[in-house]
Image: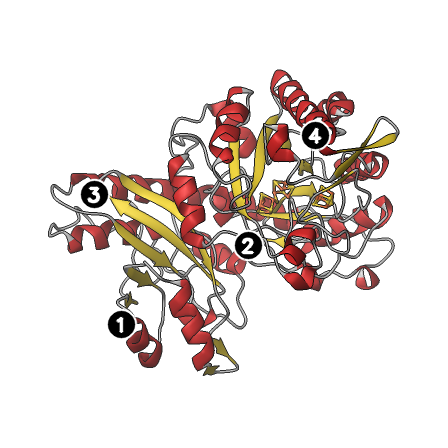
Amino acid sequence: MFTPMILRESRTSTTFSDQLLENAKSLGCSPPSTALGDIDPGTWDKIKNHPCFSEEAHHYFARMHVAVAPACNIQCNYCNRKYDCANESRPGVASEKLTPDQAVRKVIAVANEVPQLSVLGIAGPGDACYDWKKTRATFERVAREIPDIRLCISTNGLSLPDHVDELAEMNVDHVTITINMVDPRVGVKIYPWIYYGQRRHTGIDAARILHERQMLGLEMLAERGILTKVNSVMIPGVNDEHLIEVNKVVKGRGALLHNVMPLISNRVHGTYYGLTGQRGPEAFELQALQDRLEGTKLMRHCRQCRADAIGLLGDDRGHEFTLAEIPDGITYDASKRQAYRQLVARERGDHLVAKNEAIRTVMSVEYGGSLLIAVATKGGSRINEHFGHAKEFHVYTVSRRGIKLAGRRRVEQYCLGGWGEDATLDHIVNALEGIDILLCVKIGDYPRKQLTQAGLRATEAYGHDYIESALGALYAAEFGIEPPVKTATA
Ligand code: CLF
Ligand code: SF4
């Protein structure tokens, strides 16, 4: 048995962590559990607070990036250097570049204000392994100030083998390598040149060297027990089919997770692909490819964040922390982060029980098809966002085989200043194509009607419930059985 919970909805004045603090204070919750599918306890211990390496953790924990590494040693056809590294961040306004000392000040300021912060990542804006001195200095200084923060790095892999031993010494236990090909003949269509061994290489020679260095780096990380995620950019007509082979090869060499991300390509970004009209994949194409990779561990909750992103994935607070506003002599105060972690541990225990119960419910349905359900959430594994405030929807596939995150659909916010825009609503309806049901905490009559006309049902009936509990109850109701017990309800 566990206690019903209420997450208070107050969009304007209450953050998700405030809500969690309020909830946990008023509750007697189950103890936390570390059981998570087929992941061994040692690995779970490393990923349980990492929002990228654990889908479950991303509901509770935040990462921050510091843009200390602007130099890069390769050229990708989807990057034009004016923006952050597109391997780990979408092209946008270029980040505020930081020195290691400035980065440390910023990390302390964020750790004091954002209790969810658990990971410091360096993801460019160039390549963190090539711009190594600044990366190393930043990690060393931050680890001295905040010893329990996890260190994470993202790289194109070319310089990685030179620094694996140092990464191990510094306890960097999460590394991401962007691997878009394992066949240099595919690589030549993605990389016009690389800089390696004091000179520039082009053509098949460049792609071959990059491939060999990426494979070597991957193996070296696996040998040292450093958890590795591989990011691959899906480029239709260039490497989309080839990513099946990439998946096999990287898993065979010890990658823990594979994250297939869509190419973002637009003429205004000035990239080779943008200027030559190379398109990115549609949401359904990405999902179809990910479904073909089912059975291997896939990351499906990536937000393609900027090199200076801060906060929970999908809720960037980077603009709140500009260097000019951070005092010089700032010191670290651990109290908020520690209190938050204790509360999350309790909430997570309850969530796990509710999730397992929901999975049992859907698997007990004798005859039932598959439903694609979109959920509006702002964290905490709950349906706790208004339709009009959502900037994205999490999409789940629910069938008798279980409940799976299928991805997310990014949308423009419908309601701004109390009014909804018709054009925005049209865009949202298009973005939700193929979805059967939408769950949110509130939705107005007009958008509900428009969604219904497009064949999509929206309901507030499960507002504030755990996502999985709602999906389980909904599935059972759709296919005609009563759920055993309704769990966490408002
Ligand atoms: Fe940053 Fe990357 Fe570490 Fe995460 S991001 S360096 S692994 S802490 Fe995460 Fe952002 Fe996706 Fe990257 S959502 S782009 S996967
Ligand atoms: Fe750009 Fe990153 Fe590729 Fe370097 S590795 S060229 S910064 S996308």
Relative placement, left or right, of 403 versus 182 is left
Calculate the distance from the C-alpha at mark 1 to the C-alpha at mark 2. 31 Å
Q: Of the numbered discs in the image, which one, if any, rests on residue 279?
A: 2
Q: Mark 2 or mark 4: which comes first in sequence?
A: 4
Q: Are marks 2 and 3 in contact (CB under 8 Å)?
A: no
Percent x, y for residue 288?
A: 39, 44
CB at disc 1 and ligand 1 closer than 8 Å: no
Q: Secondary structure at mark 2?
A: loop
Q: Which residue does the image show at 79% across and 37% down from the upper left? A: 73
Percent x, y for residue 192?
A: 73, 40
- The label nearer to you, 2 versus 4, is 4
The three-letter amino acid code for the residue at tag 2 is Arg
Q: Quadrant of the C terminus?
A: bottom left
Q: Mark 4 or mark 3: which comes first in sequence?
A: 4
Calculate the distance from the C-alpha at mark 4 to the C-alpha at mark 3. 53 Å
Instruction: Name the residue tied to disc 4.
Output: 204
Instruction: Name the residue tied to disc 3.
Output: 361
Quadrant in the rendering for residue 464: bottom left
Q: Of the numbered discs in the image, which one, if any, rests on residue 452?
A: 1
Q: Residue furthest top?
A: 223
Q: Of the numbered discs in the image, which one, if any, rests on residue 118?
A: none
- The label nearer to you, 1 versus 4, is 4
Q: Secondary structure at mark 1?
A: helix
- The label nearer to you, 3 versus 1, is 1
Q: Mark 2 or mark 3: which comes first in sequence?
A: 2
Q: Out of 51 and 205, give the one closest to the viewer.
A: 205
Calculate the distance from the C-alpha at mark 2 to the C-alpha at mark 4. 24 Å
Q: Are marks 2 and 4 in contact (CB under 8 Å)?
A: no
The three-letter amino acid code for the residue at tag 1 is Thr
